[in-house]
Image (cartoon, grey):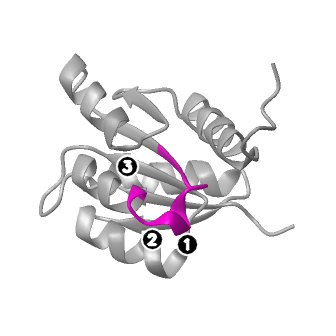
């Protein structure tokens, strides 16, 4: 079985590097994009299983990038985990409405993020109508 691919869309280089290392240590294949536009390009090239998406970024924010990704039916099984320092209800609601599977506030516990990303991916991979109770 091939490694799970995770795309990290984060404009803060230090945090992007920490995220990439944490996922790589779990055996995941990683790619990094520095803004929403790079993220959209990487989605097409890298074909991630999971996207870790920051919300506040230059050029194209995470909400609009998520919305654009979700418009492509080829990414309906891609899990999207939102990260943000913005923890207000409107930001959370906008990101979830755009198509994120999960919203985590910064700061976060890295091991929890990796585990929740795996859970979000597993939930996306369950065929429609096959959910367990």
Q: Residue at x 62, y 38 (%)?
A: 120
Q: Is residue 125 left or right of residue 104?
A: right
Disc tally is: 3
Q: Which element carries disc 3, helix, strand or loop?
A: strand
Q: Does the magenta-highlighted stretch encompass residue 73? A: yes
- Return the x and y of residue 50 as percentages of the image width and height: 56, 54
Residue indicated by mark 2: 43
Q: Name the quarter where the C terminus is drawn.
A: top right
Residue indicated by mark 3: 53
Q: Name the quarter where the N terminus is drawn.
A: bottom right
Q: Residue at x 19, y 45 (%)?
A: 56
Which of 15 and 98 lies nearest the eye of the viewer? 98
- Seen from this angle, which residue lies furthest bottom? 45
- Return the x and y of residue 39 as percentages of the image width and height: 34, 67
Q: Residue at x 23, y 53 (%)?
A: 64
Contact, mark 1 vs mark 2 (Cβ under 8 Å): yes
Write the start and end of the magenta stretch as one range: 70-80
Q: Quadrant of residue 74?
A: bottom right
Q: Residues within 10 Å of mark 3 (few under 14, many from 20)?
A: many
Q: Residue at x 59, y 40 (%)?
A: 117
Residue indicated by mark 1: 47
């Amino acid at each position: 079985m091939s490694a799970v691919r995770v795309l990290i869309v984060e404009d803060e280089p230090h945090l992007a590097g920490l995220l990439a290392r944490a996922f790589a240590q779990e055996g995941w294949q990683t790619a990094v994009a520095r803004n929403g536009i790079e993220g959209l390009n990487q989605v097409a090239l890298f074909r991630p299983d999971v996207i870790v998406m920051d919300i506040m970024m230059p050029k194209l924010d995470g909400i609009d990038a998520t919305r654009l990704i979700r418009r492509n039916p080829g990414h309906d099984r891609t899990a999207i985990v939102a990260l943000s320092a913005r923890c207000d209800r409107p930001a959370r609601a906008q990101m979830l409405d755009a198509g994120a599977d999960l919203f985590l506030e910064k700061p976060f516990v890295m091991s929890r993020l990796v585990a929740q990303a795996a859970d979000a991916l597993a939930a996306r991979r369950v065929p429609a109508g096959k959910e367990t109770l």
